[in-house]
């Protein structure tokens, strides 16, 4: 019952009234990564992604979760889907890191006394860099070729701001005027993937409203989970008479940042980067969006860069939205396996297209004792265009 086919069978049984949606039944869906690898492998083209999301929405409508589980999920969604709250959390977290308290607690082993879910959350916390505000409009360099909107995201807006800054610089260098609407909310990806449909719909409407006023040709994402979500707004809002058509038009404009850049003839000169880079396929990029070759093509254009393939590239790293926060044991096992495969390559860097994967891989490689650093693909391209050294890449 923990295979895609088994879960589809359970869905069928419940829809026919032959099975009850109870904690045991729901457990089979909680353990699903939602990585969509089964969709890539399926010869019949079954759209499992929509089935699992609709099923999780049904589960969340039932009073089957414990009060503690509900509280923990509210904590996750309350923090990670609200940029304003994340911004307020920055100073306590920076104080926790810079005071030496984090290092002390990690060395002492005290953190091992926490519940595994909280241990997992703490282990994923990166060293927080200075916050980098993104201008609402960044002019194109040279002849303007596109007017693009940038989905700022939540984690990359407040926790990993170097991702958005790099994306803006690269897009501008390639002749794109970049518009980043200040009022844009969370896109709702984490809510959609976890079955919290009401909140997801509300955030989707807010995102559409923000970008409709921007008048852009393309809407760019630099997070695989966000990208797969906004490309499905047409499906999410299909029954909304006010937003259904607007959602379809919005989704038709959405592209991953590497997807857009691969379509444009390069105009900015790539400076050499002498480094070995292993590319990690984020699940919601390779399986949900079908974006595989574009990031590799962009990295291959950089002189001196040796691109390496990670064995078992189709297998999830264990991040999977909030999976590593709610299923820490399974996520850790996947992360350790992926980290071991990467460490064996002896690469200088890992490039990936999703902030969740980035944090999961950093954590796994640190436990593995590997010196390999993990960055977003766009950061490497940005370093090349700016003529920086590999050592300057912020992690």
Image (cartoon, grey):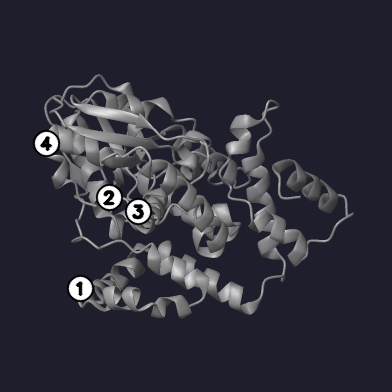
* Front one among 385 and 280: 280
Q: Is residue 197 visible?
A: yes
Q: Which residue is mark 4?
A: 386
Decide which of tag 4 and tag 3 comes sooner along the chain.
Answer: 3
Q: CA distance from mark 4 to mark 3?
A: 25 Å
Check residue 98 in the rendering and tell me which mark sits there, or answer none. 1
Q: Nearer the viewer, mark 1 or mark 4?
A: 1
Q: Which residue is mark 2?
A: 371
Q: Residues within 10 Å of mark 4 (few under 14, many from 20)?
A: some
Q: Residue at x 15, y 45 (%)?
A: 391
Label 3 element class: helix
Label 2 element class: loop
Q: CA distance from mark 3 to mark 1?
A: 19 Å
In percent of width and height, residue 275 lies at 21, 34
Q: Nearer the viewer, mark 2 or mark 1?
A: 2
Decide which of tag 3 and tag 1 comes sooner along the chain.
Answer: 1
Left or right placement of residue 275 versus residue 327 in this view: left
Q: Is residue 322 visible?
A: no
Label 4 element class: helix
In percent of width and height, residue 283 lies at 49, 41
CB atoms at circles 1 and 4 under 8 Å apart? Answer: no
Q: Which residue is mark 3?
A: 362
Q: In the rendered view, would you say 118 is above or below 353?
A: below
User: Which of the 4 image quadrants contains residue 368?
Assistant: bottom left
Decide which of tag 2 and tag 1 comes sooner along the chain.
Answer: 1
Decide which of tag 3 and tag 2 comes sooner along the chain.
Answer: 3
Q: Residue at x 72, y 66 (%)?
A: 62
Check residue 288 in the rendering and tell me which mark sits there, or answer none. none
CB atoms at circles 4 and 2 under 8 Å apart? Answer: no
User: Which of the 4 image quadrants contains residue 28?
Assistant: bottom right
In percent of width and height, residue 159 lies at 30, 60
């Amino acid at each position: 019952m923990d295979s895609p086919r088994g879960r589809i069978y359970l869905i069928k049984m419940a829809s026919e009234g032959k099975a009850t949606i109870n904690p045991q039944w729901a457990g089979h869906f909680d353990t699903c990564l939602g990585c969509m690898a089964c969709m890539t492998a399926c010869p019949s083209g079954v759209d499992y992604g929509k089935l699992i999301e609709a099923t999780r929405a049904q589960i969340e409508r039932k009073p089957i979760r414990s009060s503690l589980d509900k509280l923990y999920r509210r904590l996750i969604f309350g923090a990670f889907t609200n940029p304003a709250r994340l911004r307020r959390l920055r100073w306590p977290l920076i104080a926790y890191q810079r005071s030496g308290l984090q290092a002390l607690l990690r060395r002492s082993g005290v953190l091992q006394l926490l519940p595994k879910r909280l241990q997992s959350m703490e282990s994923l916390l990166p060293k927080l860099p200075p916050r980098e505000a993104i201008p609402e409009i960044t002019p194109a360099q040279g002849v303007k070729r596109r007017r693009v909107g940038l989905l700022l995201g939540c984690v990359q807006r407040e926790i990993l701001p170097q991702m958005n800054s790099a994306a803006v610089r690269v897009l501008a260098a390639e002749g794109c005027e970049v518009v980043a609407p200040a009022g844009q909310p969370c896109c709702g990806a984490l809510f959609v993937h976890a079955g919290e449909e009401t909140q997801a719909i509300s955030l989707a409407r807010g995102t559409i409203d923000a970008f409709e006023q921007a008048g852009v040709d393309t809407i760019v994402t630099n997070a695989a989970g966000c990208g797969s979500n906004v490309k499905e707004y047409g499906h999410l809002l299909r029954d909304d008479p006010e937003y259904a058509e607007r959602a379809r038009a919005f989704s038709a404009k959405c592209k991953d940042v590497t997807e857009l850049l691969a379509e444009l003839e390069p105009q900015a000169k790539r400076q050499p980067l002498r480094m070995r880079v292993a590319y990690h396929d984020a699940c919601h990029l390779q399986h949900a969006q079908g974006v595989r070759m574009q990031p590799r093509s962009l990295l291959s254009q950089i002189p001196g860069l040796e691109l390496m393939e990670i064995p078992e590239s189709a297998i999830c790293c264990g991040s999977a939205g909030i999976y590593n926060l709610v299923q820490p044991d399974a996520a850790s096992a996947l992360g350790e396996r992926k980290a071991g495969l990467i460490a064996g390559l002896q690469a200088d860097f890992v490039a990936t297209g999703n902030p969740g994967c980035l944090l999961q891989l950093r954590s796994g490689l640190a436990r593995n004792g590997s010196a390999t650093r993990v960055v977003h693909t766009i950061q490497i391209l940005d370093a090349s265009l700016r003529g920086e050294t590999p050592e300057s890449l912020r992690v």
